Amino acid sequence: MAPKVNEKLDVQNFKFQYINIDESESHDACGMPTAVSWSDFLAKNKTVVITGAPAAFSPTCSISHIPGYVSKLKELEAKGVDQVVVVTVDNPFANQAWAKKLGITNTKHIKFATDGGAQFTKSLGYELDVGEGVYWSGRWTVIVKDGVVTYCGKETNPGTDVTVSSVEEALKHL
């Protein structure tokens, strides 16, 4: 079921994994994934922008969707965003390599999260059925403030569209 504006985001049974990126670490290797409960993550009086991408390194995601969030991170922070989370179903190592390729040197304010099996994404109704029982994330954005949804938008054409999931649209709703 799609999230609804002005309602609490139900994330009680879901976790995500990410790999911490620290400016001081080697770029030749990475750490091990950290598992985080969405309910703990969103319950701490934070404003979090969560954006889903079909796949790390995919053309639209790498050229026009996620680079906007990376380049406008300071603008998002200035509007009160504590954290941006980029969600894919890719493994954490692929997500970390993608984050580094996009210029991320610190995951303090932006994390590239793995939604194993698309469980969280499916709970939102934002999965992309690519056939034969395989699901990716669609392209979408949800803004959560103090655990309550303040904006949600899912692309109708996740292959190429970056409209309601764009950083510009997120900035308008903060």
Image (cartoon, rainbow, N blue to C red):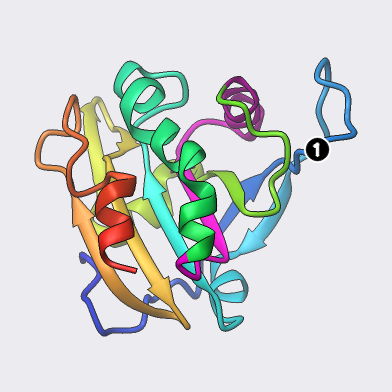
Q: Is residue 121 magenta?
A: no
Residue type of the residue flagged with mark 1: Met
Location of residue 61 by image quarter: top left
Location of residue 24 by image quarter: top right
Q: Is residue 95 magenta?
A: yes
- Residue 157 in the image: x percent, y percent? 11, 34
- Residue 30 in the image: x percent, y percent? 81, 28
Q: Quadrant where the C terminus lies?
A: bottom left
Question: In the figure, is residue 12 to the left or right of 93?
Answer: left
Q: Tell me what residue is drawn at x 59 percent, y 24 percent.
A: 94
Q: Tell me what residue is drawn at x 25 percent, y 25 percent.
A: 132
Q: Which residue is mark 1?
A: 32
- Residue 167 in the image: x percent, y percent? 34, 47
Total marks shown come to 1
Crowd around label 1: few <14 · some 14–19 · many ≥20 (10 Å): few
Q: 5 or 13, which lies in front?
A: 5
- Tell me the SS state at disc 1: loop
Question: In the figure, is residue 164 to the left or right of 116?
Answer: left
Question: In the figure, is residue 38 to the left or right of 124?
Answer: right
* Position of 150 relative to 57 (above/below): below
- Residue 48 in the image: x percent, y percent? 48, 65
Q: Tell me what residue is drawn at x 62 percent, y 75 percent.
A: 40
Q: Tell me what residue is drawn at x 26 percent, y 68 percent.
A: 151
Q: Which residues are magenta?
A: 79-101
Q: 91 or 112, which lies in front?
A: 112
